[in-house]
Image (spheres, grey):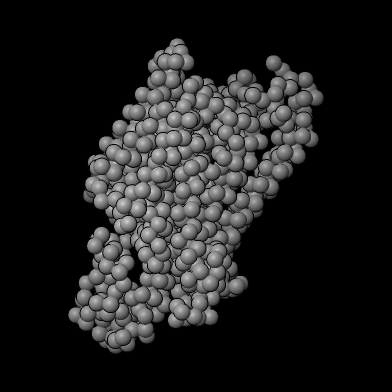
Amino acid sequence: MSAPQGTQGAANAYWREHLKLLFTLLVIWFVVSFVLGIFLAPALNAIEIAGYPLGFWIAQQGSIFVFIALIFVYVARMNVLDRKYDVHED
Amino acid sequence: MDLTTLTFIVVAITFAIYIGIAVWARAATTGEYYVAGKGVNPIANGAATAADWMSAASFISMAGLIAFMGYDASVYLMGWTGGYVLLALLLAPYLRKFGKFTVPEFIGDRFYSRTARIIAVVCLIVISLTYVIGQMKGVGVAFSRFLETSYTTGLFAGMAVVFIYAVLGGMKGITYTQIAQYVVLIFAYTVPAIFIAVQLTGNPLPQLGLGSTLSPDTGSGGVYLLTKLNQILVDLGFNQYTAQKGSTLNIFLLTASLMIGTAGLPHVIVRFFTVPRVRDARKSAGWALVFIAILYTTAPAVGAMSFFNLFNTVQPGAIGAEEGSLAYDNRPQWFRNWERTGLLEWQDKNNDGRIQYYNDKNAAFAQKANEQYGWQGNELVKVDRDIMVLANPEIAKLPDWVIALVVAGGLAAALSTAAGLLMAIASAVSHDLVKGVFNPKIGEKGELLAARLAMAGAILVAGYLGLNPPGFAAQVVALAFGLAASSLFPVLMLGIFNKKMNRAGAIAGMLAGLTSTLVYIFWYKGWLFIPDTNMLPDTPDYWLFGIGPQSFGAVGAVINVIVAYVVYKVTTPAPEEIQHFVENIRVPRAGGTPAQ
């Protein structure tokens, strides 16, 4: 079942765009949790916002909110991407 | 009405609800039994996933862990939530597109290998069985402590309820009970937290209360809670609450291992097989994290606030002054209650009839306390971290129904996780072993019966292990996450993102990740966790580069990927039809055929 060239090209383009989105989101995921929440946390703790040392807040609260946002951004962007390449369901 | 009766009534009502749901959600086909007929609404599945995921440990122990570890407990908060980003982006949608029943089935089909499938089944069973022991123990303990039954009776009651809805309803029954259990557990967790936040800070949102100033009747009005907590801890010879204490490398690797392990846990992954479409799987992961975050962002507040309450109780005045320490005879009622359970223990080392709680392992402070205050050592010789959640309602002087609710919540957390794990085990046995390996010709009815029998068997095994918990039960969390991170997650990811990855690479990678992680854990914890068989003491001084055994999963995952790549490079790539299979799962609706 070899797909026609055009379909194959489109499928590759879809996957490339998808990977680009994944890469961007995972960079943010890494920076927020590991860079800000762990490696830079001691330094960020010098900054205090509304009673929270910043590094501590990112590690125990902020990062979790960012994780949620990342998934919903992914959901929205993928819905757009699926339609653009006409691979969406229903 | 006394507390025990009230608790009994509340627990009985919740159990009746679970059984009612079971009768309504009976499964008639294998599709319903394994994946709830793929008809679960994504938001509902999010709630079910949250209950599936949040165990007795999340509900009872996590806030206490945070209290005693402060910043360093962030590894659990980030590790156990950040994994959902990996799950949503790297696994869930494609596995849903695959559209069959189990995780080992995907590994077997993708790597065209029965061997790979069997290795995956073994990993799944080890991970899920070790995990389920803790849940069964949680059920028994909750019953024996709050309902004045024996541990065994409690365990049997829990087993009976799970038996009814899991054997009857399979994944369908489990899904809808998990949703009900989520409601019970989240209500039970947040109500006391809101009360405490209001009492201490005047702010009803615990997430904001954590960063608020203390209210005047705490004796430290106007000071930020965290500032005050840092100050108390330092004054008593402990480390600052908000400062990092462990090694950065170990904190980094532990967080990474928990994240990767979370994403690789089969009982969580399989929840995303139950939604109707690929886009629902993505959305559902987001909702799961929202529901999880309600508890996970509340826990740091519960930890810090109940810790503050503890210090404020035992150290009501100036440190070193005689009246600064609480007289033992004046201890509050909750203190007496928890002493009786053995979770809180006091020893009057300097015979002054007062409670001194401080860090006597800090040599400089211990010496100062001894010379200037006449303290002879820390007198709260035991403060079990679990009381941070369990004693909360009493410390905050909340009405009895809140305490009853907390018990029902803890049971809901334990039962929902246990059911999810048992489902993963049962389907691996009936679908991957019985149908996949031993008797491929088995029909729909036969397989459904096999699935029910496997579930009944899994419940009995789990119950047996709950009654006779192996001595290593406390250690196995490291094992479960380590195995999920080092064996299942990498091979699933490679199977989706590298379409040429072949059978030899996958098998070699899984075995390498698995073996390296097992050896590293056993090296410090003892072979098969048998005491005194460890090769090196399990302390940071002896850890390789300061990497703790719990943190090794991420390293095992990297080893898995490297070995898989090397072996794949020197062997033949996956056949053409497998590459088409991978291209097909990467898009929600491929090749012009609508997804089912």
Query: Which residue appears at 52% of the width and 23% of the height?
Result: B31
- Quadrant of res B430: top left
Instruction: Work out whether residue B20 or residue B428 is closer to the camera in this orientation and state it.
Output: B20
Residue B42, given in percent of the width and then of the height, sits at 60, 38
Residue A23, given in percent of the width and then of the height, sits at 67, 46
Instruction: Work out whether residue B400 or residue B425 is closer to the camera in this orientation and state it.
Output: B400
Let me know if residue B208 appears in the view.
Answer: yes
Residue lying at the far front in this picture: please name it: B1
Residue B157 to residue B394: above or below: above
Assign the N terminus of chain B to one quadrant of the image: bottom left
Residue B579, given in percent of the width and then of the height, sits at 63, 24
Residue B479, given in percent of the width and then of the height, sits at 38, 44
* Residue B466 relative to residue B126: left or right: left
* Residue B593 relative to residue B198: left or right: right
Query: Which residue appears at 60% of the width and 56% of the height?
Result: A65
- Quadrant of res B280: top right
Let me know if residue B528 appears in the view.
Answer: no
* Residue B490 relative to residue B381: left or right: right
